[in-house]
Amino acid sequence: MLSIERFFPAWERLAIHESSPVVRGASVKLARRCAGYSASQYYPDAPLGTVPTGKSFRNENLEKLTFPDGAFDLFVTQDVVEHLLDPPRAFAEIARVLRPGGAHVFSVPLVSKERPSRIAADRDATGAVVHHLPPEYHGNPVDGSGALVTRHWGFDICDHIYAASGLTTTIVHIDDLSHGIRAEYVEILISRKPAHAAAPA
């Protein structure tokens, strides 16, 4: 939330979508104070673009978003990008639904740091999940079995995002004890969509 407040001071007046919100911190503040805030979770067995029966959130898959082009000023994800089976497709979809000048603001553990990012799991030609490293799972707010870790990202994530979406990414490292922030894996990434289309070559 600190990065949103610092880099997007008018955030309360923006159209913001958050994928996989949690019940604390930035998710709660955004929902309470931003009139243009919306949120979604991913329920694999429910129709996309709907609120499934008994659920509180719209169902959205980051690889196949149902939103129109240019729907949002900011797209927020917290510790989601390390669980994507097709990150390039998701990065491209997020870019598509951002307005010109918009941004994807997100956290992701950069565990590989200066080393190349590693693929832990992906899909084969049939869509089945293939494990390249021993399976690892993180907490999942909508699935008690957890969320499979698919990537051990490094600083080269910026190159992967640009190749997939054309968005340029800044890594913000916050070391600020006045806000209680001093730890490993606290980087916030901001991927920006150009405000204007590039002129033809």
Image: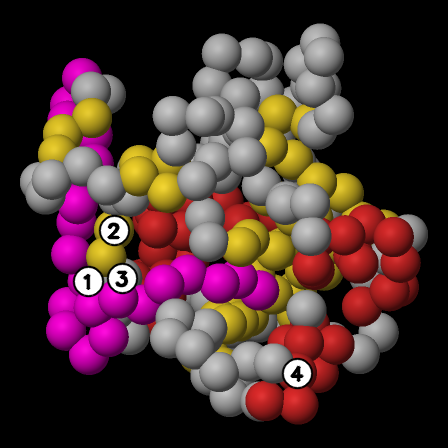
**Color style of the picture:** secondary structure
The location of residue 4, given as percent across then percent down, is 69, 72
Q: Residue at x 27, y 62 (%)?
A: 153
Q: Which residue is mark 4?
A: 179
Q: What is the C-alpha distance between the residues marked 4 and 1?
A: 30 Å
Q: Position of residue 138 (x, y in %)?
A: 37, 43
Callout 3 touching callout 2 (CB < 8 Å): yes
- Label 2, residues with CA under 10 Å away: few <14, some 14-19, many ≥20: many
Q: Amino acid at mark 3?
A: Trp
- Sequence-wise, the earlier of marks 4 and 3 is 3
Q: How many marks?
A: 4
Read off the residue under disc 3: 153
Q: Amino acid at mark 2?
A: Arg
Residue at image mark 2: 151
Span shown in magenta: 105-126
Count residues near mark 1 (Cα–Cα under 10 Å), then give few for <14, some for 14-19, many for 20+.
some
Q: Secondary structure at mark 3?
A: loop
Q: Quarter holding the N terminus?
A: bottom right
Q: Given this view, does label 4 or label 2 mark the residue nearer the observer? A: 4
User: If the image is split into quadrants, where does the C terminus sit?
Assistant: bottom left
Residue topped by disc 1: 117
Distance between the alpha carbons at the discs numbered 2 and 1: 7 Å
